[in-house]
Amino acid sequence: MTSTKTTMTNGTPLALAFAALFGLSGSAVAQGMPEPGSAAAPGMEAPASAAVDDAKFDDFVEAFVAVQEINDELSGQLMEAPDPERAHELQQQAQQEMVVAIEEQGISVEQYNEIVMALRHDQGLNERLHQSLSTRQ
């Protein structure tokens, strides 16, 4: 529980998870996230795909899908937000829901971010994600 509180307080790991979602979905590359092919952000080393075992990767895919669903819902809500304050509240709520969704899959936000960084640098792992997502549909 402490890790979630820390994540919510300093915002960096959560912001990276949220930004990573946008980066992978092609919507935007959020502040602080490296462009594909560039060096990883300080403290965010990209693990090799071999370091991501099947069980952890499967948990990541489930978390990724859940986070993407939250993001899709948020996008619709943001379009209908009456003012910037409400939009900010919706974003904060969505970020909290994303943390819960990630942790419910048995991985931490830090592990989620590590795999996202690996996806940005490892074409084989990226293909593995796309393959996993395509078999879900």
Image: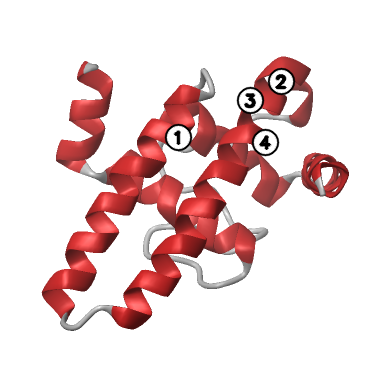
The residue under label 2 is: 51
Cβ atoms under marks 2 and 3 closer than 8 Å:
no
Task: Give the vertical position of 11 relative to 61 (above or below).
Answer: below
Cβ atoms under marks 2 and 1 closer than 8 Å:
no
Q: Earlier in the sequence, mark 2 or mark 4?
A: 2
Locate residue 89, reporting x and y percent: 18, 61
Mark-to-mark CA distance, 2 and 1: 23 Å
Q: Quadrant of residue 19?
A: bottom left
Task: Give the vertical position of 54 relative to 48 (above or below).
Answer: above
Locate residue 1, reporting x and y percent: 24, 17
Q: Earlier in the sequence, mark 3 or mark 1?
A: 3
The residue under label 1 is: 101
Amino acid type indicated by mark 2: Ala
Mark-to-mark CA distance, 2 and 3: 14 Å
The residue under label 4 is: 61
Cβ atoms under marks 4 and 3 closer than 8 Å:
yes
